[in-house]
Image (cartoon, rainbow, N blue to C red):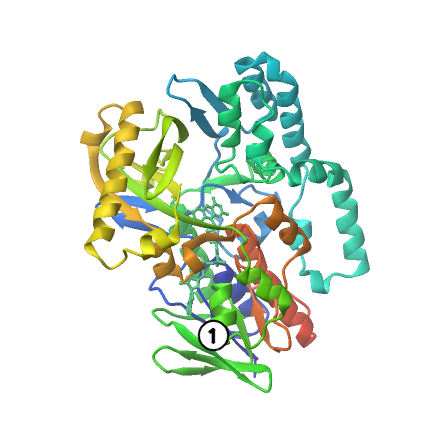
Amino acid sequence: MAPKIVIIGAGVAGLAAGCYAQMNGYESHIFELHDIPGGLCTAWDRKGYTFDGCIHYLFGSGVGMPFHRMWEELGAVQDRPMINHDRLLEVQDSDGRTLTVYCDPDRLEAEIAAISPADAALAKELASGVRTFTTFDMTVMQEKPRTLMKPQDYARLGQHMLPFVMPLLKFGMTQARSYAERFRDPFLREAAARMFGWPEMPMMAGMQLLAYMHNGNAGFPMGGSLAFARAIEQRYLALGGRISYKAQVEQILVEHDSVTGVRLYNDEIHPADIVIAACDGRATIFHMLDGRYVDNRLRKLYMGDLPLQSMMQVSFGVNADLSRRPHWTTYLLDKPMLIAGQERSDISVQHYAYDPSLAPAGKTAMTVLLKSDYDYWQRIYGRKLYDTEQLQVADQLLTLIEQHLPGIRAQIEVTDVATPVSFERYTGNWQGSTCGWLLTPQTMRLMIQGLPKTLPRLRNLYLAGQWVEPGGSVTLCAASGRNAVQMICAADGRPFGTEG
Ligand SMILES: Cc1cc2nc3c(=O)[nH]c(=O)nc-3n(C[C@H](O)[C@H](O)[C@H](O)COP(=O)(O)OP(=O)(O)OC[C@H]3O[C@@H](n4cnc5c(N)ncnc54)[C@H](O)[C@@H]3O)c2cc1C
């Protein structure tokens, strides 16, 4: 009889793990607390609008490029057009000065030098960094889990990494925020800090993002994030997998330091030979296993002060066609403004007019993503104040957006607010974090070293998803689901296959 694998969570990591488990002859069953697949890779419908809650850029979107084969194996990209933008975003101040963050390094260099000739040398350095990373293939780090790598794999990895050692040292440990301080032009100092979306981002990660976008390998999948996740769910079901929705795992069952199954909140027990926890790491380790299998490293990781990415998303259904406007603009505020308890110096507005399937004809879905403190919302959750505060935030944002898009307030047909508490409720992620540990120079080091995918002294439990891949992303999370099954196959002495 085929060994039975229980997978906790039908996010991208869990779905990917399920697909590869089925391809390799295991009998798998996914338990998911929500009633839909995707986890954070999701979208929600409101009065004809689809508000996308996840993918802005999908690594592996380009045919024949790094990670694309994995998405093909998972049935996610076949017949799915990808939208490639020529720019990541624009940053604009109240005088209309604009930095367009082009993906093409030549255009980016020219753009910055035109804004400030005194910064031409720095523009050249930035563009050259982006050019360097156009040949960086991240799959060499994800192709196999570290524990399975043989000397020849390390040799291949080393060979691939060699040309990037200097750029990694130079740009890996510098955040966009501190890099931006080197610009002489005051507007560029502000704008460049936000050129990759958030100022904590390591320069290397931002450069790599632009490089992947320039290569046509970080596009937006038409139909949006939930449709993308549903395609993987369909692939999993077609491979013979089982999913139970509205089925929250309460406990991972263990006998003699080896997992034996899971117990759900409704007290159902589901025996298993192997469990893959593709859900929140903290809940897995400290709740579902009562903290019995930890060491100092894990304790430090989860009890330390590593930054998370708790966010709120305010979505608007706009009765107007915004397709002629840039799809992502960060507006610098003249003076800081208190929004949801935090002082803000900018707001980032995105629209999805480039994908007509996400709104009725002639209308546009528009979103604003803000970092937001989990505790701020948790303290008022369940009270009327929670709803009132959500409306107030939406109203404040509209007042600011109105300064750049006059008349927009009158065109708003739908408003929807998701706070870190919403993200936590729907996906179980600690503090509603949208990517596990936030990618900073500190967590990037962890990403390169690789976090353990098993727990000390516990047999037959594997971890997958964003809590073992710092910085998250649907691509690295799917790859970690794949890695978990590679480890299981290796432990069973089976060759790992991707057919099915
Ligand atoms: C606003 C936003 C923008 C993003 N932008 C991008 C982007 O542009 N590109 C990109 O690649 N990534 C992006 N990401 C990050 C990416 O979505 C995540 O890193 C990735 O989807 C995480 O996948 P996962 O499977 O590891 O975790 P999750 O998606 O969190 O999946 C875990 C699943 O486990 C379920 N679960 C939890 N506990 C239990 C339990 N006890 N029992 C049963 N089920 C349980 C949850 O309901 C969930 O479905 C973004 C995320 C957000 C929120």
Q: Position of residue 490 (x, y in %)?
A: 68, 71
Q: Nearer the viewer, residue 255 or 149?
A: 255
Q: Nearer the viewer, residue 327 or 469?
A: 469
Please state, as top left, top right, bottom left or bottom right, where the C terminus lies in the image.
Answer: bottom right
Q: Going 61% across and 69% down the picture, which residue do you hit? A: 454
Name the quadrant where ligand 1 sits: bottom left
Q: Going 47% across and 61% down the picture, which residue do you hit? A: 235
Query: Callout 1, which amino acid?
Result: Met
Q: Is mark 1 within 8 Å of ligand 1?
A: yes
Q: Position of residue 141 (x, y in %)?
A: 67, 52
Q: Is residue 36 left or right of residue 496?
A: left
Instruction: Tell me the quarter of the picture where residue 259 sits.
Output: bottom right
Is residue 309 in view? yes
Q: Is residue 211 above or below residue 24?
A: above
Please state, as top left, top right, bottom left or bottom right, where the N terminus lies in the image.
Answer: bottom right
Q: Which residue is mark 1?
A: 288
Q: Is residue 426 above or below residue 53?
A: below
Instruction: Tell me the quarter of the picture where residue 137 sits.
Output: top right
Q: Position of residue 167 (x, y in %)?
A: 71, 36
Total numbered labels placed on residues in the image: 1
Q: Going 66% across and 31% down the picture, which residue do you hit? A: 129
Instruction: Tell me the quarter of the picture where residue 362 sits.
Output: top left
Q: Nearer the viewer, residue 158 or 389?
A: 389
Q: Is residue 244 above or below residue 391?
A: below
Q: Going 46% across and 46% down the picture, which residue do you hit? A: 79
Rate crowding at label 1 as few (under 14), some (14 to 19) or many (20 or more) other CA atoms within 10 Å: some
